[in-house]
Image: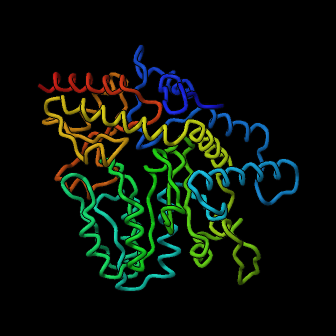
């Protein structure tokens, strides 16, 4: 199924929503769904659902192991999706694409495999204060085993990274700089190419958490010169339970396997084994075949719309949301101005807990997220227990923002 646009550079959310079956759902009788939680997970277009359904109906078989017709068809579809995904992020070689369960597992793979093989006591890893827990805890676990040093690029009051402090940290000879491309809390789009370039000048490798970035704007891992680059299917119109790790071939070749068994071996004896070639060295066991095919369909869907079109739409919608939210008495916004962000508006409502805000909005079919959004240190930085987060994607429109504002006035009325 092809996506629908009004013309080559303008996205029509009303038509786009027709591609997503869930938007026919009423959250309460007579109350349609207004989905403002795409930073947590995006909705799925019919093209993705149909691609996965077609696999199970017509070509369900295990891959790489059989020589019968179904196995060969499944393998061809699976590897074709790998190539589509490589093309989507600008990777030069499809075998630099490793399938995992999610961004979290991709980061853990690097920490467990590259980290254990290459880091020693006292080595420095640079992170940031705005990281998702998935890019904090794996390094904390490794630090407890190897006694590494963790240092953090500070976040200023506007929600931007302090690059002057980053440059000072780089003088301490870090081994790795691991950072988020786009904050899941405040929507900050970090200058990834500059951060990577400076890290390489200092002799460090880089890992980019691109879970929020890849769904929203075009990326090119070769142009960025990223060493590792991780993202999730479910945030970009694809199915859940699937992540992607891009890694430079030389690095992946030198890394030991992450999990053992199944497809990651070339030869096994009772007391030894030989690892398979890339990418299969890191894909032990039967993979998420239907999900990989589904992500391939999602990539085609997004490509058909155009990532620049999606980026422009999301930016414009976020700017409108920030303007409207500033009108509401008692609402306090967090994060940078629209020049440095997109897709997310995080806020507090004076005197009202975010959970209460979310529950009241839900009565009108508005789905927003309330909590610390798996970024507790960033909330502690701003002395906040939680925030309410509205996040926007290709199927949202200005009327959704208007309904959000109406809902917040209801919150104000209820809580006085």
The quadrant of the picture occupied by the C terminus is top left
Q: Residue furthest front?
A: 8
- Residue depicted at 52% across the width and 67% down the height: 109
Where 367 falls versus 111 (above or below)?
A: above
* Residue sitting nearer the eye, 136 or 314: 314
Where 361 falls versus 342 (above or below)?
A: above
Q: Which residue lies furthest to the right in this view?
A: 68
Where 266 falls versus 218 (above or below)?
A: below
* Residue sitting nearer the eye, 61 or 191: 191
The quadrant of the picture occupied by the N terminus is top right
Residue 373 visible, this angle: yes
Horizontal relation, residue 28 to residue 214: left or right = left
Q: Which colour scheme is used?
A: rainbow
Horizontal relation, residue 57 to residue 50: left or right = right
Task: Give the percent coordinates (x, y) of residue 79.
Answer: 72, 54
Residue 284 visible, this angle: no
Where 33 falls versus 110 (above or below)?
A: above
Task: Give the percent coordinates (x, y) of residue 302.
Answer: 56, 40
- Residue depicted at 69% across the width and 75% down the height: 275
Task: Give the percent coordinates (x, y) of residue 174.
Answer: 36, 79
- Residue depicted at 34% across the width and 85% down the height: 122
Task: Give the percent coordinates (x, y) of residue 31.
Answer: 40, 17
Q: Residue 172 falls in which quadrant of the image?
A: bottom left
- Residue depicted at 39% across the width and 73% down the height: 199
């Amino acid at each position: 199924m092809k996506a629908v646009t009004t013309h080559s550079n303008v996205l029509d959310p009303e038509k786009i929503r027709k591609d997503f079956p869930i938007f026919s759902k009423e959250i309460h009788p007579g109350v349609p769904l207004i989905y403002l939680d795409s930073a947590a997970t995006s909705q799925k277009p019919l093209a993705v659902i149909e691609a996965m359904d077609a696999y199970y109906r017509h070509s369900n078989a295990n891959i790489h192991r059989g020589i019968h017709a179904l196995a060969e068809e499944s393998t061809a579809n699976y590897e074709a999706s790998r190539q589509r995904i490589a093309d989507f992020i600008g990777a030069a070689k499809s075998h630099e694409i490793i399938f995992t369960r999610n961004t979290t597992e991709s980061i853990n793979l690097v920490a467990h495999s590259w980290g254990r093989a290459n880091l020693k006591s006292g080595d420095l890893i640079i992170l940031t204060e705005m990281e998702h827990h998935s890019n904090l805890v794996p390094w904390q676990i490794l630090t407890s085993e190897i006694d590494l040093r963790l240092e953090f690029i500070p976040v200023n009051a506007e929600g931007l990274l302090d690059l002057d402090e980053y440059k000072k940290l780089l003088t301490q000879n870090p081994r790795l700089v691991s950072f988020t491309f786009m904050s899941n809390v405040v929507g900050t789009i970090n200058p990834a190419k500059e951060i990577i370039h400076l890290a390489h000048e200092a002799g460090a490798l880089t890992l980019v958490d691109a879970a929020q970035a890849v769904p929203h704007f075009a990326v090119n891992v070769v142009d960025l010169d990223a060493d590792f680059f991780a993202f999730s299917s479910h945030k970009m119109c694809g199915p859940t339970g699937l992540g992607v790790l891009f890694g430079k071939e030389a690095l992946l070749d030198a890394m030991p396997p992450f999990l053992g068994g199944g497809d990651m071996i070339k030869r096994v004896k009772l007391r030894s084994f030989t690892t398979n070639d890339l990418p299969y060295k890191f894909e032990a066991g039967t993979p998420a075949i239907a999900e990989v095919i589904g992500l391939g369909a999602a990539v085609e869907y997004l490509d058909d719309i155009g990532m620049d079109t999606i980026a422009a739409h999301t930016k414009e919608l976020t700017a409108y949301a920030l303007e409207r939210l500033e009108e509401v008495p008692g609402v306090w916004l967090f994060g940078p101005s629209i020049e440095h962000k997109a897709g997310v508006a995080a806020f507090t409502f004076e005197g009202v807990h975010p959970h209460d805000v979310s529950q009241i909005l839900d009565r009108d079919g508005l789905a927003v997220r309330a909590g610390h959004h798996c970024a507790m240190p960033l909330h502690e930085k701003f002395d906040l227990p939680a925030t309410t987060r509205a996040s926007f994607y290709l199927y949202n429109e200005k009327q959704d923002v208007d309904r959000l504002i109406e809902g917040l006035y209801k919150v104000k009325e209820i809580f006085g």
